[in-house]
Amino acid sequence: MSTATIRLMQPENLAEVTRLAEKESWNYSQDVIKALFEYSPEGSFIAELQGKVIGVAMGFNMSEEEAFGGMWIVCKQHRGLGIGTRLRQKVEEYIGDRNLGIFSVAERVVPNKRLGFTVESWKVRHVSGTIATEKIKLSEDCIVSAFPSQGVQFDALIQYDTKIHSIERERFLRVWVEGKSTTTLVAMSKADEIVGYGVIRRDSNNTTLLGPLYGETSAIIKTLLVSLMGKTTFGETVDMWVPVGSEILQELLTENKNTLKVHAEFTRMFYYHDVKAPRKKIFSIASGAVAHHC
């Protein structure tokens, strides 16, 4: 058993947690880790040994019934000493009896079942590269405007997001959509109703993340996608986390086969029951780093 101390993460730990994530090949920028921490400081734990951060685990209580897990990392030289188990216990104490969900890499699906994640749900793919938007056919199903704008304030965005996600997540969205390097676009119907929205943000690693991106129809999703890509520079690489089975993704991969690649696939898993989501209305989730969110 290691003598490492397990305690709540503090703002001054963010840089060291980021270095640990990078060292262990978790592609999390400090900006994303900061957003996660600000969303759930009471569910963010570190393992510390001789003043050095050697492990981290994060949990996020979404409602009285639902919770999701984020990072769970222990540096290689300190594995097998029970540190990961102690970190996980802290997260479990924080979430209580809630239905915990995660996104799991393929090789962890079976071990995660032994840890209590008995329900397998849908999968997402990590996709990155450049997109030739001129090849995307658009129709005039909506009007896209920047958020916030007249008639589209935060309460309205929350209401639409909750329709998709099924769980109200105001605290997360305030952190995710209001960053200095973030652009949020909202799609409005001719009746002035929100019919989709999308977010694009640049993190401290100079990575451009595209998501979440939701829309009531494929045409609306495509319009938002083209509008969001218009906020990037020519040839800029974007990162996306897209549900498996997305017809729009397949179309993009076909049209951009030399510049857009699938890197990995992850399975959504839960303790007790699946949390349903209208996948046809979801083009991309916030990020694999924010795996507890659509």
Image (cartoon, helix red, strand yellow):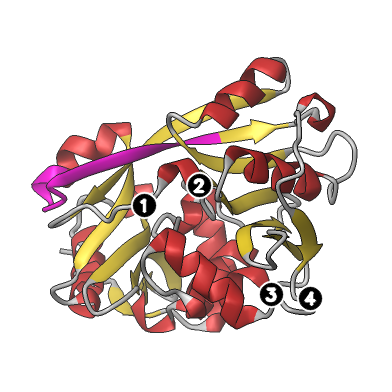
Q: Gap in Å between the C-alphas at discs 2 and 1?
A: 8 Å
x and y, in percent, of residue 33 in the image: 54, 66
Question: In terms of sequence position, does the residue under pointer 4 or pointer 1 come before the other?
Answer: 4
Q: What residue does disc 4 label? A: 149
Q: What residue does disc 2 label? A: 282
Task: Indicate the secondary structure of the residue bearing disc 1.
Answer: loop
Q: Quadrant of the N terminus?
A: bottom left
Q: Amino acid at mark 2?
A: Ile
Q: Please say if the residues under marks 3 and 1 sit with CB atoms less than 8 Å apart.
A: no
Crowd rating for badge 2 (residues with CA inside 10 Å; few <14, some 14–19, many 20+): many
Q: Please say if the residues under marks 2 and 1 sit with CB atoms less than 8 Å apart.
A: yes
Q: What residue does disc 3 label? A: 178
Look at the image and give the residue range highlighted in magenta.
Answer: 113-126
Crowd rating for badge 1 (residues with CA inside 10 Å; few <14, some 14–19, many 20+): some
Q: What residue does disc 1 label? A: 277
Which is in the foreground here, disc 3 or disc 1?
A: 1
* Near-viewer residue (143 or 214): 143
* Residue at the (55%, 82%) spot, across then down: 11
x and y, in percent, of residue 227 in the image: 79, 48
Quarter of the rendering containing residue 149? bottom right
Question: In the rendered image of this protein, does residue 69 appear above or below residue 127?
Answer: below
Q: Is residue 171 left or right of residue 60?
A: right
Residue 252 magenta: no
